[in-house]
Image (spheres, rainbow, N blue to C red):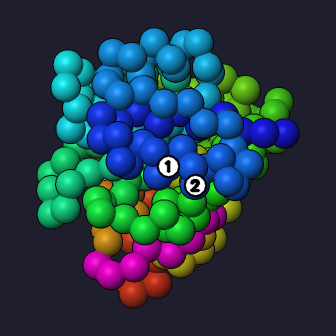
Amino acid sequence: MRFEILVIDDDEKITSMLRRGLAFEGYGVHTANNGTEGLSKVLSVDPDLIILDVMMPMIDGFEVIRRLREGGSTTPVLMLTAKDEVENRVKGLDLGADDYLVKPFALEELLARVRALLRRKESVGEAEGHRLTFEDIVLDLDSREVVRAGQRLELTAKEFDLLYLFMQNPKRLLTRDLLMDKIWGYDYSGESNVLEVYIAMLRQKTEEYGGKRIIQTIRGAGYILRGDS
């Protein structure tokens, strides 16, 4: 099976580099040089993964991903952001991006992240007809919906995958390294707090309607899904 990847970026040098590098790895590559064209190609190409730049004319990357997620798309999105713009990375994740990469970047690292996102997409897709429950939470893999106490939770694709992993392993300590490996497929370097950001967002959404905290922090060890507060 050949995966189809859509690159949305107005920088022709980056677009050309990614087109060559991704094609060499065997991916089908499609490109768009602005957000409007990108949204149109999402409909015509139906890509398996989107590489999306933040700063673009007409419609920026934030608006593109907002429209995608509001339209129900769960296609993995890797966002490209400028150096040191931490607030943009957090905003992108909050809008539904699955990962981010800071420019300038090494092609080898981008390819590793692409492979990780596609592996995760495949593994979730293979688990069909499956429903998990934990206390008052129901997670449905067919519809990729999560309901708590009768209230539907609006989770991003990555938040859903993270909660799914927790619900597969209730009352079991999951280390940071394990979570990073299972969800992202590789270890972030340096002081990246992407996991902590996702845990915070997932807690906020699962507790939005007054539900008690179920994802507990075990300091120095990791996280655990359990009912005690």
Q: In the image, what residue occupies the spot 30% across and 34% down?
A: 10
Quadrant of residue 86 within the rendered picture: bottom left
Residue in the foreground of this view, choosing between 33 and 169? 33
> Pointers 2 and 1 in contact (CB under 8 A)?
yes
Q: Nearer the viewer, residue 72 or 78?
A: 78
Magenta stretch in the rendered image = 182-191
Picture layout, residue 30 above or below residue 103? above
Residue holding disc 2: 21
Q: Residue at x 68, y 37 (%)?
A: 28
- 189 falls in the magenta region: yes
**Residue 229 visible in image:** no
Q: Whole-percent x and y of residue 58?
A: 20, 19
The secondary structure type at the circle numbered 1 is helix
Q: Which residue is mark 1?
A: 18
Judge left or right: residue 142 versus residue 1: left
Locate the C terminus and report the quarter of the image it occupies: bottom left
Q: Amino acid at mark 1?
A: Leu
Q: Nearer the viewer, residue 24 or 226?
A: 24
Q: Nearer the viewer, residue 5 or 126?
A: 5
- Was residue 222 drawn as part of the magenta stretch in this picture? no
Badge 2 density bin: few <14, some 14–19, many ≥20, Cα 10 Å: some
